[in-house]
Image (cartoon, rainbow, N blue to C red):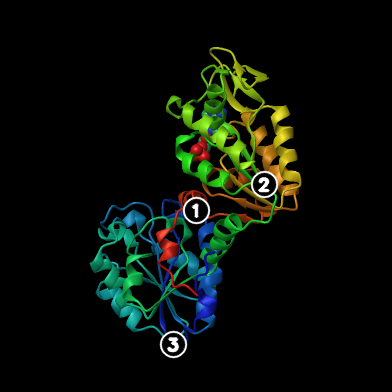
């Protein structure tokens, strides 16, 4: 059970608080095209302001590769955050991130003021968790708050290194929510616990499958991954996605599910196309009987029914990875059916970040889910059962 100190456990009145956020927003010609991440950061920032802290915000944005790149400056974020908060967010433009300008801006702060530092990845040491930049960041503050889940699986200066040089390091509300749902719900779930895995490759989810088989009551595998399992069991899969290096692994996982008494559900039918395009010819066939020249691009209707039924009586459902090539409308139905089933069930529904989060939102089911993770890579590592450095670095309760 992860039990980390949060912003609710500290008193920041009059203190300088460095808060690591995830402001890695898409920009087009200097304009923010999706501000979800800014909105998601507001509760923690507002709490720190209301408590009378001097709130110093920091984040990375894109990949400037250790040097200032004007097009990846956080300046536009300061402007939009000021509007969202209804108070000035002073932007501390500084090529060194923590250089003379930033220090002067922090020095001039009153209680309740907000300053935003420049893109932390302007500094080379950031992604190497180097000492000098970690110390620079720590020198600005009395207290550190980490609210950036999207980078929690990386050990960088601004989320891990800095904590070595401050006495108090806690998590913000966003991080707390991710820990509660992805960490604690998965490790101590209300049962029946069903996990649904999809997406392209078995190889990217090996540890997730292995770890979840120790925890779930039912494991559903759809998407491109399913064809490696179908071939391993002696089926023909045409030109469907397949990782021949993982055939034995697939058989091992089928065996492990049996040993553990986990119900493993694989697609029984599949929607195939004669080309990887939305407008190809389409057929529905049994999953292990795909003709030459055809490929599986979505689960079939019988499978949709089985998968949807499996989540009906669940109490906890975790979903990571689409059931088919949902980007093509003709092959989105399987993913849509699973999303709809999750929207209807009374279970706690947790969506791993990345493609499944995007699919749920695009299909309009976002507000029907209990929790949609803000971090793709980080949520996968949580599901693999790994310790995330950004979470581990926060003080325990
Ligand atoms: P991942 O990043 O592993 O979660 O994979 C997501 C991608 O898997 C999406 O872009 C889907 O289009 C793709 N995908 C899902 N099912 C299939 C399939 N049957 N064949 C090829 N790609 C698929």
Q: Secondary structure at mark 2?
A: loop
Q: Residue at x 55, y 28 (%)?
A: 229
Nearer the observer, 368 or 250: 250
Dot 1, how many residues are within 10 Å of its Cα: few (below 14), some (14-19), or many (20+)? many
Residue 220 sits above or below residue 366 on the image: above
Say left or right for 220 vs 40.
right
Nearer the observer, 188 or 115: 188
**Mark with earlier residue (3, 2):** 3
The location of residue 5, given as percent across then percent down, is 50, 74
Say left or right for 370 vs 99.
right
Dot 3, how many residues are within 10 Å of its Cα: few (below 14), some (14-19), or many (20+)? some
* Residue under numbered circle 2: 364
* Residue under numbered circle 3: 14
Quadrant where the N terminus sits is bottom right
**Mark with earlier residue (3, 1):** 3
Marks 2 and 1: in contact by CB < 8 Å?
Answer: no
Distance of mark 3 from mark 2, alpha carbons?
43 Å
Give the quadrant of residue 321: top right
Q: Secondary structure at mark 1?
A: helix
**Mark with earlier residue (1, 2):** 2
Under 8 Å from ligand 1: the CB of mark 3? no
Q: Residue at x 72, y 39 (%)?
A: 308
Distance of mark 1 from mark 2, alpha carbons?
26 Å
* Residue under numbered circle 1: 382
Q: How many marks?
A: 3
Nearer the observer, 59 or 197: 197
């Amino acid at each position: 059970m992860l039990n980390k100190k949060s912003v609710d456990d500290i008193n920041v009145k009059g203190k300088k608080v460095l808060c690591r956020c995830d402001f890695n927003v898409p920009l087009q010609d200097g304009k923010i095209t999706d501000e979800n991440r800014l909105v998601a950061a507001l509760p923690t920032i507002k709490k720190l302001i209301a408590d009378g802290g001097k709130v110093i915000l920091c984040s990375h944005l894109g990949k400037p590769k250790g040097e200032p790149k004007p097009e990846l400056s956080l300046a536009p974020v300061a402007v939009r955050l000021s509007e969202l908060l209804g108070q000035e967010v002073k932007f501390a433009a500084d090529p060194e991130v923590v250089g003379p300008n930033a220090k002067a801006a922090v020095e001039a702060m009153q209680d309740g003021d907000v300053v935003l530092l420049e893109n932390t990845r302007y500094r080379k040491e950031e992604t190497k968790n180097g000492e000098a930049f970690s110390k620079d960041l720590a020198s600005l503050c009395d207290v550190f708050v980490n609210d950036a889940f999207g980078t929690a699986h990386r050990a960088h200066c601004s989320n891990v290194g800095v904590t070595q040089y401050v006495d108090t390091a806690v998590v913000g509300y966003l991080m707390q929510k991710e820990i509660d749902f992805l960490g604690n719900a998965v490790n101590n779930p209300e049962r029946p616990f069903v996990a649904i895995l999809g997406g392209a490759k078995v190889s990217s989810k090996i540890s997730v499958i292995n770890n979840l088989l120790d925890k779930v009551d039912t494991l559903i595998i759809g998407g491109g991954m399913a064809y490696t399992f179908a071939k391993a069991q002696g089926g023909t899969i045409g030109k469907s996605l397949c990782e021949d290096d993982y055939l034995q692994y697939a058989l091992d996982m089928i065996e492990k599910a049996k040993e553990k008494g986990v119900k493993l559900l694989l697609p029984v039918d599949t929607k195939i196309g004669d080309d990887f395009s939305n407008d190809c010819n389409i057929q529905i066939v049994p999953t292990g009987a795909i003709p030459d020249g055809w490929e599986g691009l979505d689960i079939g209707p019988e499978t949709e029914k089985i998968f949807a039924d499996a989540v009906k009586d669940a109490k906890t459902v975790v979903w990571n990875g689409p059931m088919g090539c949902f980007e093509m409308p003709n092959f989105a139905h399987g993913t849509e059916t699973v999303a709809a089933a999750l929207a209807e069930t009374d279970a706690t529904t947790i969506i791993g970040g990345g493609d499944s989060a995007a699919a749920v939102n695009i299909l309009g089911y976002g507000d029907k889910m209990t929790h949609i993770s803000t971090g793709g890579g980080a949520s996968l590592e949580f599901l693999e059962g790994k310790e995330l450095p950004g979470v581990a670095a926060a003080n325990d309760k």
